[in-house]
Amino acid sequence: MSLFPLSLLEPSRVLPHPPKPMKASLSSDASEKRILIDADQISKFPDNVLVRILSTLATEDAIKTGVLKKRWQHLWKRVPYLHFDMLIDMLKEATLDEEAITKVLHSHNGQLKGCSINHYAQLCKDPNNVLKTWIQFLVHEKETKALSLSNCHGDGTRSNQLLLSPGLFSHPNFETLFLYRYGFKSAEAFNNCHNLRILKLETIYAEVDVFNQVLASCPSLKVLVLHDVMWLKYKSASLKIHNKMLKLLHVSSVYVDCIDVSAPLLDIFSSYCLPLDGESDVTEKSPKLLFDNRDMDFNRVNMHYNISNQAQETERIGHEFVVSKDAKYLQRIRTLAVFVNVTNLKQVKMLRQLLSACNGTLKVLHILFQLQEENLSKEEGETSTDGTQNKMWDEGKLFPNAEFRVESVSLVDFTAWNEAHFAIASRFITEGTVTKKMRIM
C-alpha cells in the first residue's frame, strides 16, 4: 500500500506543463459563455469528484476556480495536496510571499496528505522562524503525512541553517520528509522520530555526528536517501546507519571515509562517495542483498537490488520509490547488480521498470539469477514453466526505454536449459542494448 503519490512532493514534479491560469472574465462574450457552460456542466458532479479534479491542478490554479461559481469558492480548501513555488511566481512577476503561503495553509480545511514548499530564504523576513511556523502548523495541527521543503538559493552553511525546536518532526501521523539545501547544527528537531518512514535529505550540510544522531532518532525508516550531503569540516568521517526496518538506502557524499551499514531487511542499496584520500570503505551487514558471497567487489558496484526479495513484500515501498521521479539519483548510477528470478512475471516486470528508469548508459550490469527456482513457493499466475513463460517474453520489448544502453553485461548462475535465462540473454543482443560485451557465468 502506497502512502501517497511520492512524486507530488518534488516541486518540479507536480505539473511538468502547468495549465494556464483561469481568468474571471474573458475578452469576448462567446468565450465567457463557453466557460460558464463548462462550469455548469462540471458543477453537476458531486463535491468529492470536483475535489479530485482540482487535485490535478497546481494550487494557484485550484484557488482561482473559486471565481467560477459560488459553490467552487471553498472546494479547493479540501484538496489533499498543496504545492507552493516562489520561483514560478517570480518568473510570472506575481506575488507569493510568506504571508500568502501562510494564509492559504490556514484556509485549507480538509485532510492534507502532503505539502511541498519551494521557497527563497532571503525573501522571508525571518526565514528560520517562518519555516518553524510552517512545520509546526503542517505536522502538528494539520497532521500532514508528507512534507517537502526546498530552498532555491544559497548554501546550507549560512543562509539556510535550520534552527528548529526539539521534536518538531515528531508526530505519529507524519511519515515522509524531503529537505533540500539546508544546514543542520543539531539533530534536535528529529528527537523521537519513530514515526518517519521515508526520509530524503538532499544537499544538506552538517557534521557527520549530526547526521548519525538524525538517523539514530528515526528507527522506523524504510526509505533513506542521503543525496549529495556534505560534512562541514573536511576531516575523516564515518557515517553510521543501523536500522532494522530499512528497505532502501542511497548515500552520495564527499569526504566520507567509511559507511557503516547494518540493515537486516535492506533490499536496495546504492552509493557513490568521494573520500579525502581517494579510498573509501563500505562496511555492510545486509544479508538480504545476497551479494557478499559472490565474486564481486561490493565497493565497485553503485547499486545492489534484490528484486526477488522485494517482490515478495506486500508493501513494495522500496521499489515504488526507486522507479519514481523522486529517485533522480538513479540517472547517475553507472554499475548495477540485481538478483532476480526471471521465470517470475512479477519480477520481470519489476526488472523492466528499474531498467526503464535508468536513463542514459550503464557501464556494467550484473544479473544474478536465482538458483533452485523450482523449489521456491510459487504465486498463482506469477511463475510458469509452460507456454505462459514464452508469452511473457513475447509481449513487447524487454527494454521499453529506447535510450537505455549498457556497455557490459554479466549473467551469473546462467543455466543453459532454462528458457528464461536464454531469452533474456538473447534480448540484450537482438534489441541492441549491449554496446560492448556480455559475459555468461
Image: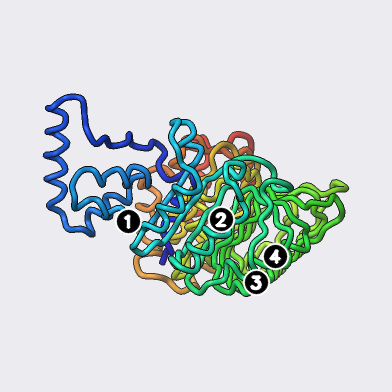
314 or 105, nearer to the observer? 105
At horizontal 68% and vertical 67% (from top left) the residue drawn is 188
SS for callout 3:
loop
Above or below — where is 240 with respect to 368? Answer: below
Counting residues from the start of the chain, the first of labels 4 and 1 encountered is: 1
* Residue picked out by circle 4: 187
Asked if labels 3 and 4 touch by Cβ distance under 8 angstroms, the answer is yes
Q: Earlier in the sequence, mark 2 or mark 4?
A: 2
Structural crowding at the residue carrying mark 2, measured as other residues with C-alpha within 10 Å and reported as few (<14), some (14–19) or many (≥20): some
Q: Residue 248, which numbered label? A: none
Per the model, the C-alpha gap separating discs 2 and 1 is: 23 Å
Q: CA distance from mark 4 to mark 1?
A: 34 Å
Tags 3 and 1 in contact by the CB under 8 Å rule? no
Residue annotated with mark 3:
191
Label 1 crowding class (10 Å Cα cut-off): few <14, some 14-19, many 20+? many
Q: Nearer the viewer, residue 80 or 358?
A: 80
Q: Amino acid at mark 4?
A: Ala
Q: Amino acid at mark 3?
A: Asn
Q: Which residue is mark 1?
A: 77
